[in-house]
Amino acid sequence: MLYFLAFCLLLAVVLTVAAWRRPDHRRRALRMGAGLLAVAGLWLAAYPPVRTQQHPATQAAILLTDSYSADTLRYLLRRLGPGTPVWRYAAAAPDTPTLGSVSALRQRLPQLRAVHVVGQGLPATDVPALHGLRVVSHSVPLTPAFHAAAWPRQPELGQPWTIEGYYQGQAGEPAWVSLVAAGTSRDSVQLPTGRGSFRLRFTPKTTGRAVYTLVARQDGRRRAQEPVPLEVRPTRPVRVLLLAAAPSFEVRFLKNYLASQQHAVALRTGLSRGLTQTEFLNFPTPPDLTRVTSSLLTRVEVVITDAASLAALSSSEAATLAQAVRSGACGMLLVADAPTLPRSLPGGTGPFQLQPRPAAATASPQLLAWPEAPARLATLLPATLRATTATRALITTPQQQPVAATRRVGLGQVVVTTATETFPWLLQGQQQAYGAYWSRLLTAVVPASPLASSIQLATSWPRVHTPVLVRVTGSSTPALRLRAAAQQAPVPVALRQDEHVPEWASAPYWPATSGWHEAQAGAARDWFYVFAPTHWRGLAQQEWQRQLALLPPPAPQQSIAAATVTTHTAWPRWWGYLLFLVCAGLLWVEEKL
């Protein structure tokens, strides 16, 4: 400022001396005045005068979010007054100051009592920062848009995968909701009224990370489109012990199917009294199958047996099997191919009660049903199970009669099924139905894997520039390393141990870009997807409204003395530029005269 002041004073002296020493003395005063005014114009352009005003402090503010209505903003300014402060949340705007954090409102406006949120709304994570304020939301429901969606984020390869949700489009116009994977539409459903719930299915064919697309069309036009990220993981190999009283096609086909799915299978088949045959598939070091011992059961996770094999176990073998199930070391699956259940069934036979079917009914195949079951899947059923409160049905008939049910015994699971012949499905070319049936039974009976270090995302819908809570379980590392897929260098984030669950440690993370992100803590590693602000806007708006409804009303405020706020407003700089140009032009014109 001092250098510029010296320059202006020197310029004023030079122009004044030049005008005074000019040989032509006409219009000397005009020339001297124009020179001084030109210098004054330069000074006003660089340092315009500042006007100081005092006015009452406001107790309301307007916060603009995405998709806000300009008409709503003008209405609020007329009602609240033109001096009401207006802020733009997160997004930079040339004509509106930007607010990066809702918590900064209280610091900038100490007497703030009400906040008017215009547009789509704030992230749900920012709602707690508004505690104690009266929050008024001015938003219009987004239409068309997806307002709900849920799907497994980490499905297993070959397992049926389902996405469910709710679409709200133009009323009265039929809508088609479809799932696009690998550039091809995999499943679709029509909503006759243009809105409603939908459910789409697809079976992933390859492992790895993928981003499917959920598309809604009305009147032949694409109305809404959202990304559906998921990470398809390989099928977890299971160690299975098969006990068969005699050779059968059912055991043969089941053994081959399990081995083809990379499961480890140990088979013991009875040939005659005291004579058995053993077979091992995918077992690097085969165990001893002569007797059912605790060392054998520690090497398997599931025991599949028929009624005769279970009844033939000695009392010590049956007790060892029951103890292994109760401790959670393995689960048990019994194929009920006899009129009665063996008494050595772990947990007792009371919860599982067989109901024989009439002879005429057993001659015709009976349809089976369960969630995600293939259509028209039928098999011969000699009996069904009686529905009890102690068991949970896994597979039923269309009349809701249980065909397979499970019961918890200690830390393990016991499953009983009355479907004794499922191999005809493979002979009929129904490989997918066969796999879905046995996958449902094995999933229910396989014990949980031992607790190891893992990484989970506690935030359901992570978004850019919003806090994401990452939780680490069973890891001793003090820091978590996170990076976006497009970045090379990870970002270290300190972990904080949970005060209630010592095995948990969490860390907040603010992603700067959308897409896949990798989290690593020691040996544990996981991927999660961060959505852009334009993704799933209908769902984000609903979450904002839901969290806002849970916000407690502000406490009655005591009357406070009227306060004033001093503002400093600078004069427009164009006045100085205009004065300089007019005076400089006058000097040039006078020189030419």
Image (tube, rainbow, N blue to C red):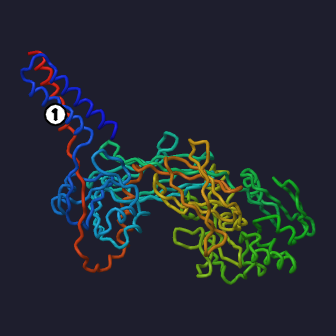
Which kind of residue does numbered mark 1 sit on?
A: Leu
Q: Which residue is mark 1?
A: 37
Q: Quadrant of residue 377?
A: bottom right
373 sits left or right of 277 in the view: left
Image height of 303 relative to 42, above or below: below
Q: Is residue 131 left or right of residue 438?
A: left
Vertical placement of 195 versus 401: above or below? above
**Residue 203 pos. (x, y %):** 57, 50
Name the residue: 63% across, 49% down.
429
Examine the rendering and report whether any part of residue 35 can be seen: yes
Percent of width and height locating residue 499 = 61, 74
For the residue labelled by badge 1, is the local secondary structure a helix, a strand or a loop? helix
Q: Residue furthest right?
A: 274
Quick one: quadrant of the N terminus?
Answer: top left
Q: How many marks?
A: 1
Q: Residues within 10 Å of mark 1 (few under 14, many from 20)?
A: some
- Residue visible at 71% across and 55% down in the picture: 523
Q: Which of the pair 252/203 is nearer the observer?
A: 203
- The answer to which of 67 and 226 lies nearer the viewer is 67
**Residue 192 visible in the shown view:** no
> What is the residue that sits farthest to the left in this orientation?
26
Find residue 221 and report its horizontal and vertical position in percent: 32, 42
Provide residue 96's location: percent of width, then percent of height. Answer: 29, 50
Extreme residue in the bottom direction? 350
Q: For the C terminus, which image quadrant? A: top left
Say whether residue 481 is left or right of residue 9: right
